[in-house]
Each structure stands twice: as C-alpha cells, then as structure tokens.
Image (cartoon, rainbow, N blue to C red):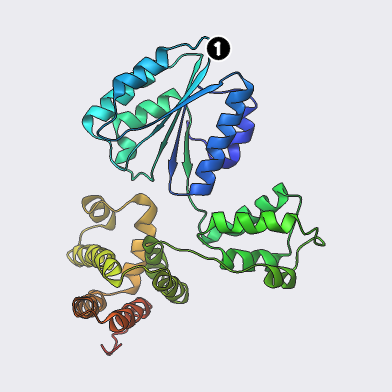
Amino acid sequence: MRLYPEQLAQHLQAGLAPCYFIYGDEPLLKQEALDALRHTARTLGFDERSRFDADPNLDWDAIFSESQSMSLFSQRQIIELHLPDKLDKTASERLRELLKQCHADLLLLVTGPKLNQQQQKGAWFKALAATGPVIPVFTPDARHFGRWLTQRLQQHDMSAEPEAIQWLAYAFEGNLLGVNGEIEKLTLQALPQPLTLSALQHRVQPQHQFNPFQLFDPLLQGKIKRACRILLQLRIEGVEAGMLCHLLARELSTLQQLQLGLLSGQSFSQLASHFHVWSSRQGLMQSALARLPLAKIQQLQAMLAATDRAVANFDDDQAWRWLHSICVGFLDERLMVITP
C-alpha cells in the first residue's frame, strides 16, 4: 500500500499498521511523518523505542532479540531501522525475516533514502509493501509547490494572495525546511490575511535550494531560463563544475544513443526499454529529441569536452561559462558558435 504524507493523518485515525516504510530525500516531510507515527504510537502505549542502522556492522540478532523482548514496565515497543543507500543480500534476507516477526505489541518504523525503480522491484521492498504502508517523501516539484505552500499556510490558519504564493514558491523552491521555518515565524506576527506579496517581501529572505539532478528536466523541456537560474544557484551553493560535467555527459550520451536509434528506424519505446529510460522521463526525452537533431547533440558534447578541459586546468570561471552556454544550447536545433 502506497501512502503519501498528506494522507497519513487520516490513515492514523483508523489505527496503526504493524510496519511503515518511509523513504525519500525530503528531510522535513520524512521527519514529520516519523513524528506523527511516534505520537500516535505513544498514545496507544508504545512507550519504548530502539533505533538501529542497517550498515555492514549491524547485529541483526540483537534486533530479533529486541523485537521479542518484553519490558517489565512496558509491553509495547517501537523499533526504528534506517536503511543505507544500497541493501546487500544478507541485509535483504534478514529484513524479510524481521518483517515476519511483527506482532501486535511491536511497531516497526523503517526509513530509507530515495529509491530508483530497480530497487523498488527488489524482494525486500515488496516484503515491506506487503507488511504495511510505504510512504514516499519527495520535495514537491515546481508544478505542485504552490499548492503545497497553500496547504501549509492553511495548517497555520493563514492564507496568501496568488502572487504571494508564486513569490514564495520561487523564493524557496527545493527548500521545504527553510520555508517551513519562515511560515512558523509568520504565525507569530499576527499579520492581516491573506498575506500580500509586499508583506512577504519585507519579512522573508529567499532561500531557494537545488540539487544537481534538478537541472536536467528543464533542459530536456527547453525551459532554458529556469535551467540557467538553477545552474547559477548550484554554483552559489558550491556544487563543483566537474560533477555537473559528469552528469551532463550521461544525459547527452543517452540522447545521442536514442537519436541514433531513431534514425536507424527503431521505435522510441524499444530504445527507451533498451537504454533503461524511466517511464517518468520518457516524455521529457521525446521532447528533447524532437527539438535537438543529432548534429546539435554532438555539438553540445563538444562543448562539454571544452568544459572538462577547463575543469582539468582549474579554470573554474571558464568551466561555468561553458556550462551556461551548454544550457542555452538546449533551446532548439540551431548550431552555436562554440565560444562561451
């Protein structure tokens, strides 16, 4: 059963499942989900809590012993287990054994990182999903961030005008912890409702935040202004140009292979399956392929090679100029003069 964070409160009104798996890369939503589960568990008499990390040094026997032990003063307990980025075969098998030990006086809270589609097909993930709800926690993307902000303000008995919501979404994109802190500060100021753009701009300092992977979807969509904004913010946040080179090389290689396959008469669906393009990204790839012929992709690869040389020569400014030129180059099929 898949359960989203905004559905958790209603779910808990009906009681607790024996196990929950919370996974993803959004720290605020993950912490809030854990806090809600812990609070509900305490009201139901789960007074003891133990935490374990599923690293190579974990003593799984200690967890099994803990799961079957009963304290003199407490008969219900919570065991929290944090999973690493990758789960080896032994850990996968022991986790599935642990899930079979769940009973009415034990609540198992499992947390983990963001998972790819292959990991979600693993036996251990399927076992978790069969035992209790799985709760993915991700940062809302630009399309849904405004709605998330509106709901978050409503939770604090506040509202905001549409242009104020739009400004908040721009000012805090990718940084839920930051905007949540600002909203909590605003609740203490008893401001007139709905909040106006002017009121927010005078009281709130923008704190948007991005990760390198957020650069690629706007590029594939041809949203170059947004991509350049993300690129600038990544530089401000200290992301290394070399890391972006590595990630861009992978994206351009995939585009090149797909375009070559299309030119040879293969269907996109066959190519997407062969090159393991996620279904959620296939539309983005098709959009880019329709806009970027093979010659343009090859030119972008040549520009990326120049970026790599700048990185190797420790010319950071030149590397970032090349990266900006590459972003602009995703706009359409026109070839560019290769001078950043």
Residue 270 horizontal side relative to residue 224, left or right: left
On-image quarter of the C terminus: bottom left
Determine if residue 144 is in view. no
Pinpoint residue 286: horizontal percent, then vertical percent: 34, 63
Indicate left or right for 5 with 119 as reference: right
- Dividing the picture into quadrants, the one containing residue 254 is bottom left
Q: Residue at x 52, y 54 (%)?
A: 140
| Image position, residue 45 (x, y; %) | 60, 18
Hey, which residue is sitting farthest front in the picture?
72
Most foreground residue, 277 or 110: 110
Q: Amino acid at mark 1?
A: Phe
Label 1's element? loop
Say if 4 sits above or below 228 in the image: above
The residue carrying pointer 1 sits among few (fewer than 14), some (14 to 19) or many (20 or more) residues within 10 Å by Cα, namely few
Q: Residue furthest left?
A: 264
In the picture provided, is 316 more to the left or to the right than 219?
A: left
Q: Position of residue 338 (x, y in %)?
A: 25, 88
Q: Which residue is situated farthest in the right direction here?
A: 192
Q: How many marks?
A: 1
Q: Work out whether residue 67 or residue 266 is closer to the camera in this orientation and state it.
A: 67
Q: Nearer the viewer, residue 99 or 221?
A: 99
Tell me the residue that label 1 is attached to: 73
Q: Where 299 falls versus 69 (above or below)?
A: below
In this rendering, does residue 245 appear at all? yes
Residue under the image location 26 percent in, 65 percent down: 255
Seen at 28% across and 66% down, the residue is: 243
Q: Residue 299 falls in which quadrant of the image?
A: bottom left
